[in-house]
Amino acid sequence: MAVEVHDVDVAEARRRLDAGARLFDVREQGEWDEVHAPEATLVPMSDLVARWQEIDGGDQPAIVVCHSGARSARVVAALEQSGVPAVNLTGGMVAWEQSGQPVVRAGASDDAQGEPRHEH
């Protein structure tokens, strides 16, 4: 039996994050290093079999993101089949960045405090 994948757009994802949901990025390390959402936790799709239990949205379904939404939709389906409530961020990091949400970019030297990058 196929699992229905629920999608959320960037605005809904932001609302859920502000309410305490967690964002999980399933892209690979190199993609993450280029650009990622500051509140995301990296759990690469290639590590999913070993690390899927780390994905927990707290009181809400986990929000899963990739580059454009295709890989994250597959991950959400797998998580749902495993009993982990999750939703797919439609449009992925492309939509996230285009909507003006904050990102951490490789080599970005903001004239700010030079905040250290945290590995998640």
Image (cartoon, rainbow, N blue to C red):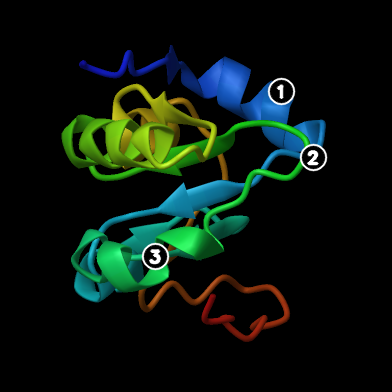
Which label is found at residue 43?
A: 3
- Residue, x 52% and y 81% (percent of image)? 119
> Is residue 55 toward the left or the right of residue 105 in the image?
right
Which label is found at residue 20?
A: 2
- Residue, x 32% and y 55% (percent of image)? 26
Amino acid at circle 1: Arg
For this orientation, the residue located farthest to the front is 1
Residue 31 sits in which quadrant? Answer: bottom left
> Of the residues under marks 3 and 1, which one precedes in the sequence?
1
Which label is found at residue 15?
A: 1
The crowding category of the residue bearing disc 1, from other C-alpha atoms within 10 Å (few below 14, some 14 to 19, many at least 20), is: few
Which label is found at residue 31?
A: none
> Is residue 49 toward the left or the right of residue 102 in the image?
left
How far is mark 3 from mark 1, CA to CA?
22 Å
- Residue, x 70% and y 31% (percent of image)? 60
Q: Are marks 2 and 1 in contact (CB under 8 Å)?
A: no
Amino acid at circle 3: Val
- Residue 3 appears in the picture as rendered: yes
Q: Secondary structure at mark 1?
A: helix
Q: Secondary structure at mark 3?
A: loop
- Residue 68 appears in the picture as rendered: no
